[in-house]
Amino acid sequence: MAAPVSSESLPAGIVNNPDAGHQVGVFPPFDAHNFVPQIIWLVIIFGALYWLMSRIALPRVENILEARRGRIEGDLSDARSMQDQAHAAGVSYDKTLADAKGRAQAMAQQTHDALHAESEAKRHALETALNAKLATADAQINETKTRAMSNVETIARDTASAIVQHLTGTAPSAEAVAAAAAKPN
């Protein structure tokens, strides 16, 4: 074991503690004797690190940031392009849909017009057929009426002759019945 050192032989700030078994003193970075070399080494190391960072690390980081910026701008450009394409497709879809609606309405109108014309033609044909049947029926009624009216006079003479014969017991002459039928009331 080493002999204890007296406090007078130690530099200032260092105290000898014989109980601890080792020397205790000022923390070396706080020792005033070490300030100048520490500052010199600090400037040298800081300068070396600054030079390394500015020549090696920072250009790499700058290249990474430029690549990322370029990729982001490219992605934004692609997104704008795709958005423009989607907008154009939407406009085209709307135009196609409007054209299809227009064609469908035109087809519906044409079909409606064709069905209306067909219906009118059928109605006209039916009216013509009914008018022809009505004319035929009117002609038959007039013919039957004319025949009936021509027979009415004969029937009236025969009936009048039969009534006179029944009442008087003698049949009147045909000229007397005709003269009586021709007389106005």
Image: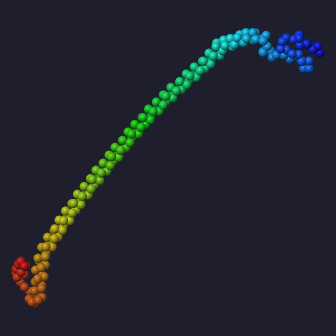
Question: Would residue 54 be found to the left or right of residue 146 on screen?
Answer: right
Q: Is residue 41 visible?
A: no
Question: Would residue 177 be found to the left or right of residue 83 on screen?
Answer: left
Q: x%, y% of residue 107?
A: 35, 44
Q: Nearer the viewer, residue 37 or 169?
A: 37
Residue pictured at 13% horizontal, 76% vertical:
152
Scheme of image coloration: rainbow
Q: x%, y% of residue 59?
A: 62, 15
Residue pictured at 79% horizontal, 13% vertical:
31
Q: x%, y% of residue 145?
A: 16, 71
Q: Residue furthest bottom?
A: 169
Quadrant in the picture for residue 90? top left
Image quadrant holding the C terminus, namely bottom left
Q: x%, y% of residue 153?
A: 11, 76
Residue 129 versus residue 170 in the image, above or below: above
Quadrant in the picture for residue 180? bottom left
Residue pictured at 86% horizontal, 16% vertical:
15
Residue pictured at 32% horizontal, 46% vertical:
110
